[in-house]
Every structure is written in structure tokens, then in C-alpha cells.
Amino acid sequence: MYFFLLNLALLDLGSISNTLPKAMANSLWNTRAISYAGCAAQLFIFLFLMSAEYFLLTVMSYDRYIAICKPLHYATLLGSRACAQMAAAAWGSGVLYALLHTATTFSLPLCQGNAVDQFFCEIPQILKISCTDSYLKSFWVVVIGVCLASGCFVFIFFSYVQIFRAVLRMPSEQGRHKAFSTCLPHLFVLSLFINTCFFAYLKPPSISSPSLNLVMAVLYSVIPPTLNPLIYSMRNQELKWAIRKVISWLFLNSDKLPLFFQK
């Protein structure tokens, strides 16, 4: 479990670091410029990290299914080598999909300016400034992405159905509460990520607006990577104890802390 959480934390950190620092720097310097190569690199890294994270969440749902529904077979089905192979497959699949999507997107000629109406290089916004007759060339890549996302979602859904069936048969109320308190927030963030991604990429142009596009982009690119570490780490009792210790120390030593602003 902690091996997969380490991979998830690295993907979340990379995802946040790929988009927000550039947007914050542009805001501070009062500019919205990004080079063509920088835009392509940002799009590739973003697609790689987000798709790899989605594949990894699929693997993690299988890990939880085996751990809860078939605990006696866990060591046989999910040894250290199998976990490493599944994590490598998630990362590798993310690289291949991102490379395919980025190459297809930036092979389209841009005929409608060079202004991307978003705080990072996003595929729907790049397709808007491409030539109309070239738009359908990337359609098959979108179809592949939708099929992969739908397949992973179905796998995650049925895994959690089996998990909940096993949890409901637990005799201990405390055990059921612990399992539900861990699974439900994760499913909420996962559903938020999937729904906003589908809406951002597949919504009809008639309901598109700059403010709505910005909200959707923040919901699927910023919120899930921010909430995932909180959801998973707050289940760790040692981390809870360490946070309480730090907060208690701050309250007890508040008079010794330096003051930076004084009247």
C-alpha cells in the first residue's frame, strides 16, 4: 500500500509543479507568454502525470480488492515484484498516451492565432486555435482516451462494489467505519476528477465560456492532486500524532516565535 502511495504522491507533486508555478510566475510578472516548446512540454508532462495517476488509481483499487476480499492470497498475487511491475506499467502507459496525444495535437496547424484562453496549455484550448479541417485528425486519439478512461472506471467501480460487499459483511462496526471513511473520500475525489475531465474535454461548444473553462480546469488539474495526499496521509496514525505534536509545540512556544510585523 505504501509503495503505491509513494508513486501517487510523486505524481501529484509533479502534476501541481507542472502548471501552477508557471501560472503564478506569469501573474507576478504580469504576462501570459509561454514558448511553443514550453507549451508542448507542459502539455506532455501534464498528460503523462494525469494519465499515469489514473492508471495507478486503477491498480490501487485492485490492490485494495485483493487485500480486503482475498487477504490470504495477497502475498501470492501482489508480491513486491508484481507491485513494481504494475506501477511501472502505469507510468509507462502514461508516457505512451501522453506522447501520442501531444504529437497528434501539435501536428495540427494553428490558423486562429496563438492565444490559449487558459492558465496552462490545455488540449481543448489548443484545438480551438487549430484549423477547422484538421480538428478531426485528433478525434481518434480522444476516442482512445475515452475508451481507456471508461475501461479503468468500470474496473474501479466493480472493484469497489466487491470491496463494499466484503466490508458490509464485517462483524466489527469499527472496521466498517474505518473502511468506509477511507474509501468514500477517495471515490469522491476520483469521481470529481473523471466528471470534470469528461466535461472539460467533451462538452459542447455552445455552453463554453472562459470562466466555466477555468473552473473546470482547476477542478480536474488542481483539486484532486491537492486532496489526494490529505485523504491518504490523514489515515496514518503516526502522521496525525506528529501534526498534533507540532501544533501543541507552536501553541506552547508562541511567545518565543519571531515577530515580523510590529506596529
Image (tube, rainbow, N blue to C red):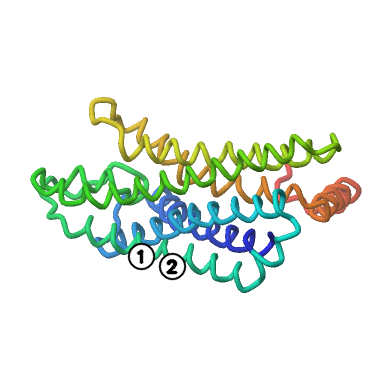
Classify mark 1: helix, strand or loop. helix
In screen coordinates, is 111 left or right of 121? left
Please tell me which residue is depicted at 34% across the width and 45% down the height of the picture: 146
Vertical position of residue 240 compared to residue 199: above or below? below
Q: Position of residue 157 (x, y in %)?
A: 54, 40
Residue that lies at the very extreme toward the right in this rendered image: 252
Q: Position of residue 225 (x, y in %)?
A: 54, 49
In screen coordinates, is 185 left or right of 209? right
Q: Which residue is mark 2?
A: 92
Give the residue type that dot 2 points to.
Gly
Q: Check the picture and name the quadrant holding the N terminus.
A: bottom right
Residue that lies at the very extreme toward the top in this rendered image: 207
Residue that lies at the very extreme toward the bottom in this rendered image: 81
Q: Are marks 2 and 1 in contact (CB under 8 Å)?
A: yes
Residue 96, labelled with which disc? 1
Please tell me which residue is depicted at 43% across the width and 53% down the height of the picture: 19
In screen coordinates, is 258 left or right of 261? right
**Disc 2 to disc 1, how far (Cα)?**
6 Å
Q: Position of residue 34 (x, y in %)?
A: 30, 57
For residue 74, what is the image quadrant? bottom right
Please tell me which residue is depicted at 70% across the width and 42% down the height of the picture: 182
Q: Position of residue 237 (x, y in %)?
A: 82, 51
